[in-house]
Image (tube, rainbow, N blue to C red):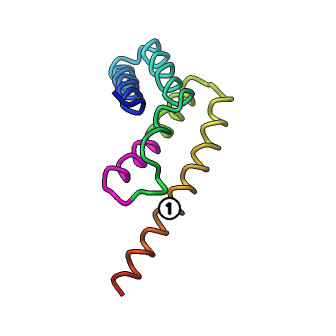
Amino acid sequence: MRRWEVGEIAYRIAQLYYGQYCRTSDSSYLAEAFVFYEAVLDREYLRDAPSAAAAAAASEVALAHKQLRLLVRFLNVSLILGRREMVLRLALLLRIVLEEHRRSFQLQFLARRSRII
């Protein structure tokens, strides 16, 4: 099992806890979701996956989407729990990742466009 696959499992568990929180409004589920999201982020499970810079395949685009979704969902959980330091950290990280992916995908688009023309 690859490292990023472990991260994928932890990410799905966090999603399950967050979904249960949305259904029950029990804050203990939200706290558990926070723990799993934090583990995925701190241990950089998704960093070992194929990078966004080489995102030519659909799976790599899906990975970029997954990384962004992770950050936004973790940001949402942190906001609800009132974890200000984590909110600031995630907002900065989200800005960096968005810029990285934007540049990467823009370069790919231009390369494909030049091949077509």
The extreme front residue here reads 1
Reply yes or no: does residue 112 show up in magenta.
no
Q: Position of residue 48 (x, y in %)?
A: 47, 38
Reply yes or no: does residue 62 show up in magenta.
yes
User: At x 39% / y 46%, what residue is drawn?
Assistant: 63
Q: Nearer the viewer, residue 86 or 97?
A: 97
Q: Position of residue 111 (x, y in %)?
A: 43, 75
User: At x 46% / y 53%, what residue is drawn?
Assistant: 52
User: At x 49% / y 69%, what residue is drawn?
Assistant: 107
Q: Position of residue 113 (x, y in %)?
A: 39, 79
Which quadrant, please, contains the C terminus? bottom left
> Callout 1: few (<14), some (14-19), or many (20+) C-alpha neighbours within 10 Å?
some
User: At x 34% / y 20%, what residue is drawn?
Assistant: 20
Q: Quadrant of residue 17?
A: top left
- Count the marks: 1
Q: Position of residue 91 (x, y in %)?
A: 61, 42
Q: Nearer the viewer, residue 101 or 22?
A: 101
Q: Is residue 29 left or right of residue 43?
A: left
The kind of residue on which mark 1 rests is Ser
Q: Is residue 49 left or right of residue 83?
A: left
Which segment is the magenta one? 56-69
Which quadrant, please, contains the N terminus? top left
Secondary structure at badge 1 equals helix
Residue 30 vertical placement versus 47 (above, below): above
**Residue ID for mark 1:** 104
Residue 82 vertical placement versus 116 (above, below): above
Q: Quadrant of residue 115?
A: bottom left
Predominant secondary structure, magenta span: helix
